[in-house]
């Protein structure tokens, strides 16, 4: 984790750029084309995408899906809160990931490639008043398996 401090403006920046570069390199995505959204609308992970036959399950077991999710979770917890929703979506299928699930992971890694400049910023406040703003997406139809928000 990199920590940058700007005393003039009273800001502290927490970044994991080097860690994320290593993650992209580990999954052979360091030269991928970046995207601007964490998960594309055309990628709709569901249980229907999970392999059903033993041959498919065996073939998919060699994919390092859970390792990729673990790497993304670490980044999400430490400095990249923008990954929280998409990581929760793809982590539902860790028990039996299919090709569509791996495509979603690759898309998230492409998003990371295009958003290295994102980091946590702590701003020094002269007053005791804090304005915390949060946004929620209540798209219950996104979860194709249960039709509720993950």
Image: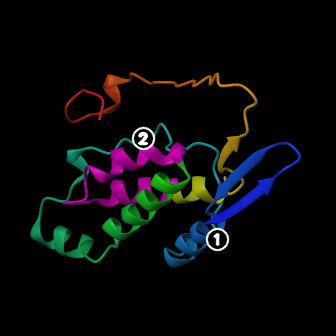
Label 1 environment density (alpha carbons within 10 Å; few <14, some 14–19, many ≥20): few
Task: Please identify the quadrant where the N terminus is shown.
Answer: bottom right
Residue 114 seen in the figure: no
Q: Which residues are magenta?
A: 81-108
> Which residue is drawn at the image coordinates 62% and 22% (left, top)?
131
Cα–Cα gap, marks 1 and 2: 22 Å
Judge left or right: residue 117 versus residue 69: right
The reply to whether the C-beta atoms of the residues labelled 1 and 2 are less than 8 Å apart is no
Secondary structure type for disc 1: helix
> Which residue is drawn at the image coordinates 72% and 32% (left, top)?
125
Report which residue position mark 2 lands on: 85
Q: Nearer the viewer, residue 114 or 116?
A: 116
User: Could you say which disc has been placed on residue 18 in the image?
Assistant: 1
The image shows residue 64 at horizontal and vertical percentages of: 34, 73
User: Could you say which disc has been placed on residue 126 in the image?
Assistant: none
The image shows residue 66 at horizontal and vertical percentages of: 31, 66
Vertical placement of residue 99 versus 140, above or below: below
Would residue 99 be counted in the magenta stretch?
Answer: yes
* Residue at the limit of the structure toward the right, as seen here: 8
Is label 1 or label 2 in front? 1
Secondary structure type for disc 2: helix
| Main secondary structure type of the part rendered in magenta | helix
Vertical placement of residue 64 versus 87, above or below: below
Judge left or right: residue 14 versus residue 55: right
Task: Please identify the quadrant where the C terminus is shown.
Answer: top left
The image shows residue 55 at horizontal and vertical percentages of: 15, 73
Q: Earlier in the sequence, mark 1 or mark 2?
A: 1
Would residue 126 be counted in the magenta stretch?
Answer: no
């Amino acid at each position: 984790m990199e920590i940058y401090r700007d005393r003039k403006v009273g800001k502290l920046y927490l970044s994991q750029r080097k860690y994320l570069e290593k993650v992209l390199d580990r999954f052979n995505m360091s030269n991928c084309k970046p995207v601007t959204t964490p998960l594309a609308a055309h990628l709709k992970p569901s249980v229907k995408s999970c392999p059903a036959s033993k041959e498919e399950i065996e073939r998919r077991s060699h994919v390092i899906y859970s390792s990729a999710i673990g790497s993304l979770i670490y980044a999400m917890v430490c400095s990249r809160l923008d990954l929280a929703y998409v990581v929760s979506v793809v982590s539902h299928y860790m028990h039996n990931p299919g090709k569509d699930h791996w495509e979603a992971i690759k898309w998230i890694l492409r998003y990371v490639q295009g958003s290295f400049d994102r980091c946590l910023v702590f701003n020094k406040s002269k007053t005791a008043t804090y304005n915390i703003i949060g946004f929620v997406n209540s798209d219950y139809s996104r979860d194709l398996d249960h039709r509720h928000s993950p």
